[in-house]
Every structure is written in C-alpha cells, then in structure tokens.
Amino acid sequence: MNRLTVVDEIFLRTHRGMGTPIALQGLWRTDDAMEPTLLQAIHDRLRAGALGRRVVRARVPGARRAWRPNTQAHPLDHVGSPLPEAAILPWADTLGTDLDPEFGPGWRLSSASLEDGGTVVALTCSHALADARGLIHAVAAALDELAEGTDHPTNGLTTDSAATPPPTALATCDVSTPPQPEPTAATASTLPPRLTMRQVRTDSRPNTDTHEKRWGTSTSDWADARVQWSTIIGGTARALRRGIPRPPATGTPDPSHDRALHSTLLTFDAAEWDDTAAASGGTPNSLFIHLVANILWETGFQNSEIAASLPVNTRDEPRVDNDLAMTEIAMDRSDTPATIRDKARTAYLRRMSSPADLPEEILQVLPDRWAYALSKGAGERDILCSNIGTLPEALRTVGAHHCDRVAARAIHPGLTEFPRTQLSGYLSKLAETYTLALVSLSCDRETLNAATDRACTAAGLHAAPW
C-alpha cells in the first residue's frame, strides 16, 4: 500500500490551514494557439496518472494515512478572452484555490489565450501530492504518452470515481535536484518543519502484493502500525537516554502587517549565467543563492546576516512523490558565489534535524494540531532557494507546439499570516535558458522589481522578462 511520508503529512496539514499554504505550479508558453483537443488529451493522461490520487485515513491507530487512486479531476479550465502579458502571473496566482488532496481533486490544468496569439498553460498541484521534481515527472510522462499516442495504464488499485464533497482550502510547496559534483537546493517554497527526511519512501507505481491490492485491509494497517510504533518507541528511548529532548529551533515570524505577496518571472542566457558563476569562483547554484540573498538586501532587509533554506532532492529514480530534505546556510554581505559554494557543499552533508531530536515518525501518530505545534515554523528562514535543476526535453514540445518558455514555482493561495520567509526563489534550466521565479512575501511589486534590477546589475547578469 502506498503510504504518506512525514513530508506528505506536513503538506497535508498546511492544506488544512496549519502552516503556510503552498501549491506548486508549472507554466508553459507557446507562440501560437494550442488546440482545446490537445489540452484535453493532456488533462486525460494526467487524470489517469500518478497525480490522480487522494488521501484516505488508516483504520488502525499509528498506521499512516494512505494514497488511493482518484480519477476525479477539476475540468480543464480555459480563459477565452486573450490575456495581456502583464496579466499572466496575476491570473496564474489565482489557480491554487479549491485543491483538496484528501476529499477532492488535488490538481488543476488551466490555459489562457494571449494577446500576442500564443497560449499559456498552467498545471497547479497541492504539495501534498508531489514536490517540484515529482510534478515535472508527471507532466513529462503525460507528454511522452501523448507523443507515443498511448494511454496511461491504470494502477491496478480500486479507483475513486464517486462524487466527493466539494473541495475547500489548499496545501503547500517544494524542491531541487542536486547537480554533480555540488548538490543544489530543491523546489520548495516555505517548507515548514525541520526534518531529516529519512522517511520510508512512497512509490506511486502499483504494488503487486495481493494484500496490498485490497485497499485499506486491516492486516496492512496493523502491519504498518507495528512498524511505526516500534520506530517511535525505540527512537524516543534513544533520545531520552541522551537527555531531555530540546525543543526545535524555530524562526520568529515577522508581523503580517505591511507585508504583501508579489511574484515575477525572469529569464537568463544560460551561457552567460554559467560564465558569470565560474568567473566569481562559484557554481550556477551558488550564484543563484547569492543573487536571491542580494535581492532581499536590496529590498531594504535590515539584518546583516541572511539565513537561507535549501531544499534538496533525495529521490534515486523518477517518481511522483515528496522526496526531499532540507538544509540551511547563513550569509553576510561579504559572501560571494565562491564562499557560498563552500558553505552549500558543507550544508548538503547535513540535514535539518527531527523535531526536538525525536523520531520524525512521531509527527504521524500525534493529533494534527500537536504535530503542527511541535514543528511550527522550524524550517522557515529569511529566504528559500529552490534549485529545480535541468528540466527534461519532453517539456519543450506539446503536440506540434514548441515551448521555449517553461517555469516552475510555488504559490501561496489564501495566505493570511505571513511566515518568517521574506523571499523565495526557484531556478530551472531548459535548453539554453535559466528561468528564475521570485515570490516576495515582504514588499510591493515596484520594490521587488527595482531590487531585482540592482542585484542583477551588480552580479553582471542581464535579465529578460519571461
């Protein structure tokens, strides 16, 4: 049976309003109009694919929640009235509502015509269903099947096609892929808790075990509960032998007043970015972290030191799941891409610890509000730098249409209380272009744009609108 991991349940709680709401979003642009039949074909394959699932509760105390295939989906959403360039992100920012990974569809495929004759397509997904790499894998699989003219195989488990209660609020965000030899961050937004992420991995592929095909059997739940309780009791005993566990270190959220949510998308020539990084003694990833930190300082951030959360992709094979860890570094104004490279390399060898040094699995057996209180705000830092890495070539072609502009980011639907995080950056590469998505949780659009221009100029980078 496919069980939720500790990370999955963290994002499930944010969907319920406990933590910073986050949804992942992929954006594609073509220069010509995309046929509705093509978009519907993509939608059908996504619906039957690994994103087509929802959470079900376990019947035995201590057993983890599980995934059940769910062929329900929000209908393909298309805006017929052409959007101007400036309206693309405001439109995309609204697409995170009504995603429900537990009682309804957790993803949505949307498209809009553009005034220049092109099309923009957005896939928005609850973070409980997947992280950034997982979302990319799901899209690439759907496009590959479309190109081959094949249908997605059903996953062999009982599907959930009956009507469900209407979806309500939303979930949270994601990670990056560590390039060699230096691991990078991942695609997340504000990942709430401090965790080692050594959880049992879930696999969205069908389980061939006879008992596992019988969804929700008491035998499977009892077996999972035994493993969970054994891990928790043993780990807690070891923690107590080392002394009373210390509370998790938490960031102090800034007041929500005078803070606003704004985003932007920029593109950079990949050769120029890589050359600039090499000339400064850094890497493309350390230049990314350096740039995001300096953008925050340029917005007027007063602290002399910036703490950065760095998500890390931990998957060993392509799959749709949350498979990430978190680490962190601290920077001051004297840091360069070279010094950040060294700090990041050291940081990737360690991961943020479990809450109060207790086994992270304890978060899966406590009541949701207790689990949230134990880990609240612990993964939040001043900035988040999520390096998604190189996107697969499959994303460049949608049917007969060529996509040169593809972006991945996180959004925060329904945000009412701001976290400590002031600025989140998401970097991805496709062909000869880097795309930088910035989400500011601290300043107005004009301040963000001006700060970005100054930081790019100081770094020797030339940004172009997405």
Image (tube, grey):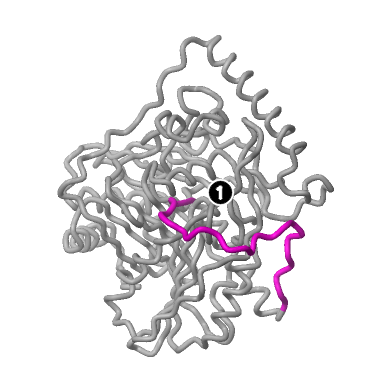
Along the viewing direction, whichever of 336 and 53 lies nearer the viewer = 53
**Residue at 53% in and 65% down:** 391
Whether the magenta-drawn stretch holds residue 44 is answered as no
Could you say where residue 268 lies in the image, as x and y percent from the top left? 37, 68
**Residue at 39% in and 81% down:** 79
**Residue at 71% in and 75% down:** 151
Could you say where residue 270 lies in the image, as x and y percent from the top left? 43, 67
- Location of residue 381 by image quarter: top left
Whether the magenta-drawn stretch holds residue 169 is answered as yes
**Residue at 69% in and 60% down:** 159
What residue is shown with label 1?
Answer: 322
Q: Amino acid at mark 1?
A: Asn
Along the viewing direction, whichever of 202 and 164 lies nearer the viewer = 164
Q: Secondary structure at mark 1?
A: loop
Could you say where residue 397 lies in the image, as x and y percent from the top left? 56, 79
Around disc 1, counting alpha carbons within 10 Å, would you say few (fewer than 14), some (14 to 19), or many (20 or more)?
A: many
Magenta stretch, overall SS = loop
Q: Is residue 351 left or right of residue 97?
A: right
Q: Find the magenta span and give its range.
A: 150-175
Look at the image and tell me whether residue 33 can be seen: yes
**In which quadrant is the C terminus drawn?**
bottom left
- Location of residue 338 by image quarter: top left
- Location of residue 400 by image quarter: bottom right
Residue furthest out toward the right = 210
Q: Is residue 215 left or right of residue 309?
A: right
Along the viewing direction, whichever of 321 and 306 lies nearer the viewer = 321
Could you say where residue 82 lies in the image, as x and y percent from the top left? 34, 86
